[in-house]
Image: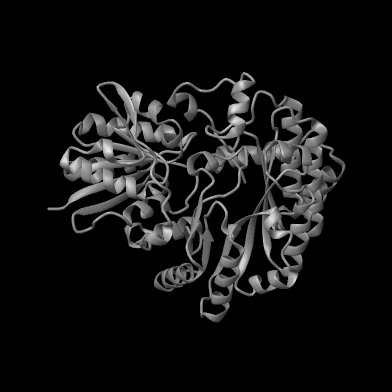
Amino acid sequence: MKKIIVLYNPAAPYHTLPLQYLALASQIDTDRYDIRIVDARVEPNAATAHSKVLELLPGAACVGVSVITGTPIKDAVCLSSLVRHRAPGVPVIWGGWHPSIFPEQCLREGYADFCVVGQGELTFRDLLSAIESRSGFDTVPGLARLENGEFHLNPGRKFTDINTFPPYDYDLIPLETYFRLKGRRQLDFYSSQGCPYRCGFCADPYVYNRRWSGLKSRRMLNDVLETARRYHIDDVVFQDENFFANQRRVIEFCSGMRESDGRFTWSATSRADQIAPLDEGLLKEIHRANLRKVVVGAESGSQDMLDMMKKDTLAEEAIVSAQKLSHAGIGADFNFIVGLPEEPFEETLKTLDTIREIKRINRSFEFNIFFFTPYPGTELFSYMVGRGYRVPQSLTGWSDIGFLSYSGEWVNRSTRRFVENFKFYLKLSTRGKMFRPVQYLAAARSRHDFYHLPLEKTFASFVLSTILHRENW
């Protein structure tokens, strides 16, 4: 009888497909192992997900848990504790962002037997062999463990070209459940790993050392088309850190899309300095390849703040990108960060003015504003530690940080309140018909920055948090 590989995805408030586990599964010998993915995000509650894992423990070779910094740590700790108590002989393996940055912390707190650091597909595969033979742990690149109380981190694994990895097997997850929760037959897809840029707020340069590997255009096209046809997909979301990192690859993919019979739409990630230089005719050609939306990491309307975070872009490129995408008929979401260390309020206002200008260009364009969070492993995190930032010293401390709603102690209350009101009223002013009775008032408020007695926001916040149980709208 085949041993079971249990892969657990902790509870979180979103329903993207667990691509990290499909990546691991692509390297596992299915003639020897039975792969079971349990995703707490699509179960009625975490207890139900835990019960499914516990039922599999008698035949389990190991339990793998993907752990990202923030509130998902709570469920990762809870599930791992249950496994350690019920089946102490079953190894618990942690991987993902937090173990890649703090492997010793994860191991010393006693919830994991091993941590996979960095690109995990081959490390996890080799670890399975070591577990089976009960030897060779010190030869597995990218593996961290404790031995007689001493922390050991093996040398890192050479970054692997993902074109050598097989396509993902989406049959391993209940796709229909995800489609129902998403509200459409939408597929998440990785066409690349890593990112070649050096943004100081992002942990990717630390974990992947600014390395990037993308599927070749023909391979990407074939994999996406085959998967879309098989599962009757109507939309694909490329969840890459930076889909547009190789422009030629994108152009070749789009050319293939136009020549194929693929009828699904798709969205992807980019930077403002990757969109702004593109010829509008080329963007229209890309749009004719069914691109519906680009998620643009604009980050700030202040050149000083962009320089501080080492974004290596120009502030005006966000506006140029919005103009070009709008002319080409392509939708857009723009992401911004405010509340950086020592950011003057007038620099924050430059970002808000940039967002207003983008909305004037195309009112259907969406935006997300995040308060800067010193994410571990980033250059700005190290800067903040040097400035006296109080770093959590335990997994419990890190699990108390909700990255969607967090703002640091260096952001004063009036700035936070002003930005939150701006976000709310500008979004409300462009929402659909159900919000029309208050849209004119919201538009006037956001035009004049008049946020006194924000009754609409108080009511909406109550509905979102108490009734809909959402952190953001």
Residue at image point 70% right, 57% down: 432
Labels in figure, total = 0
Taking 441 as reference, is 14 left or right?
left
The answer to which of 106 and 122 lies nearer the viewer is 122
The answer to which of 132 and 363 lies nearer the viewer is 132
Q: Quadrant of residue 257?
A: bottom right
Taking 125 as reference, is 292 left or right?
right
Q: Quadrant of residue 170?
A: bottom left
Taking 327 as reference, is 223 left or right?
left
Residue 323 visible in rendering: yes
Percent from the top left, x then y, of residue 123? 33, 45
Taking 356 as reference, is 162 left or right?
left
The answer to which of 123 and 56 lies nearer the viewer is 123
Relative to residue 142, is residue 219 depicted above or below? below
Relative to residue 399, is residue 465 depicted above or below? below
Residue at image point 82% right, 56% down: 360
Question: Which residue is at the far left?
Answer: 1
Q: Quadrant of residue 173?
A: bottom left
Relative to residue 79, is residue 262 depicted above or below? below
